[in-house]
Amino acid sequence: MSLLENKDVMEFVRLGVIYAHLVACCVAIGLVLTSDVAMVRDLLKRKVLTEHDNAHMESLQKSVVVALIALWITGIAVIGIDYMEKGVDYFMNPKLQAKVIIVALLSYNGVLLHRLVLPALQKAGSLLDLGFSARMLALACGSLSAVSWMYAAMLGVGRPLAWKYSLSELLMAYPVLIVLGFLAMLALTQRAKQQGNSGAPQRTLASA
């Protein structure tokens, strides 16, 4: 096989891997957004989680984990293919470094969600019924998850960003968006809690 034919084969292989990478990313983003919308809806309705909801949440979490593993595998494959073509200098690409950092944070965040947040939420039955620390952790993990998936997708399709901006410039808006997302969810949670308290029956001296 000639060098030109070998290069053509590698281009098709890379295209297939990138396609699988894109599908895994789309599936994960769809699941995360669906979960976030459902959580906000249940929060506003003060819905208590049922066994069916818990089973659905566990299934959703497992699907996101599978998609995340697929992202790691296909992402490493793409990096390996590009490394063979471009050499060690390829790893100096700030956009690549930013994507790896965000996916690493997503992976660690997923561990926290699976081991701490999800069990606590299933036990409490509602986000509003969590203790203060557990609720803050849940809001922080949820905000980081939603922002990270969207940010990673933006970096993935942003080919013009490669080599044009430094790592700090590429990640400049990332923590800001996470904080804004956390504050928005915190405000929404406080509002739902206040509405629930105002709607609760008031005890009087006669009924005490």
Image (cartoon, rainbow, N blue to C red):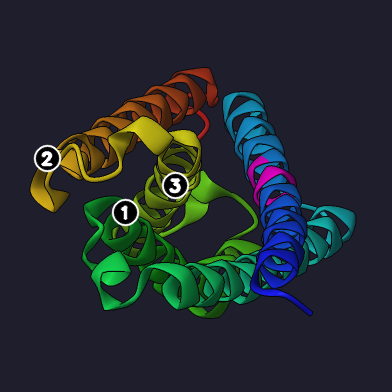
Which label lies toward us, 1 or 3?
3
Nearer to me, 193 or 203: 193
Would you say 156 lies left or right of 92 here? right
**Callout 3 environment at 10 Å: few (<14), some (14 to 19), or many (20+)?**
many
Mark 3 lies on a secondary structure that is helix
Would you say 70 lies left or right of 197 here? right
Q: Which residue is mark 3?
A: 152
Nearer to me, 103 or 13: 13
Which segment did they paint magenta? 25-29
Any part of residue 202 in sight: yes
Q: Eyeballing the image, is 10 above or below 20?
A: below
Mark 1 lies on a secondary structure that is helix
Magenta residues: mostly which secondary structure? helix
Mark 1: which amino acid? Met
Nearer to me, 195 or 122: 122
**Callout 2 environment at 10 Å: few (<14), some (14 to 19), or many (20+)?**
few
Q: Are marks 2 and 3 in contact (CB under 8 Å)?
A: no
Mark number, residue 136: 1
Mark 3: which amino acid? Ala
Would you say 11 lies left or right of 195 here? right
Q: Residue at x 48, y 77 (%)?
A: 84
Real-space CA distance between mark 1 and mark 3, rounded to the nearest whole angstrom: 24 Å
Circle nearer the N terminus (2, 3): 3
Q: Which residue is mark 2?
A: 169
- Coordinates of residue 47 in the picture (x, y in percent): 70, 37
